[in-house]
Amino acid sequence: MAEIVNLRQARKRKARAEREQSAEANRLKFGRPKAEKAHDRLENERATRVHDSHRREDADDD
């Protein structure tokens, strides 16, 4: 005998699977969390400031 399937539940299950697949694609597409991006940006700015502070001044006095 065939298994009885509730079509409403089957549609919901299919929709959930499609949304999860779409969400996974978006996670791959858009990458990292906002906080992680902000942290990396601040770290890069700090490194640039440290690097610039160690530059030698040009002594082109005539």
Image (cartoon, rainbow, N blue to C red):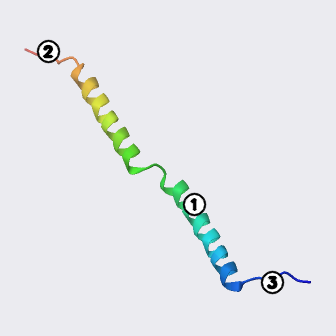
Instruction: Relative to 47, say whether 17 is above or below.
Output: below
Label 3, secondary structure: give it: loop
Can you identify the residue that label 2 sits on?
A: 59
Which kind of residue does numbered mark 2 sit on? Answer: Ala
Q: At label 1, which amino acid type do we have?
A: Ala
Residue topped by disc 3: 4
Query: CA–CA distance between discs 3 and 2?
Result: 87 Å
Which numbered disc, 3 or 1, marks the residue that appears first in the sequence?
Answer: 3
Residue placed most toward the observer, 46 or 59: 46
Q: CA distance from mark 3 to mark 1?
A: 33 Å
Q: Residue furthest right?
A: 1
Considering only vertical position in the picture, is 4 above or below 46?
below
User: Callout 2: 10 Å neighbours few (<14), some, many (20+)?
Assistant: few
Residue 19's place in the image compared with 61, above or below, is: below
Q: Is residue 20 left or right of residue 4?
A: left
Q: Earlier in the sequence, mark 3 or mark 2?
A: 3
Residue 52's place in the image compared with 31, above or below, is above
User: Which residue does the image show at 21% across and 17% down from the upper left?
Assistant: 56
Q: Which residue is mark 1?
A: 25
Left/right placement of residue 9 relative to residue 60 reads: right
Of residue 22 and residue 56, the one placed in the foreground of this image is 22
Local secondary structure at mark 2: loop
Q: Are marks 3 and 1 in contact (CB under 8 Å)?
A: no
Instruction: Name the disc covering residue 14, or none.
Output: none
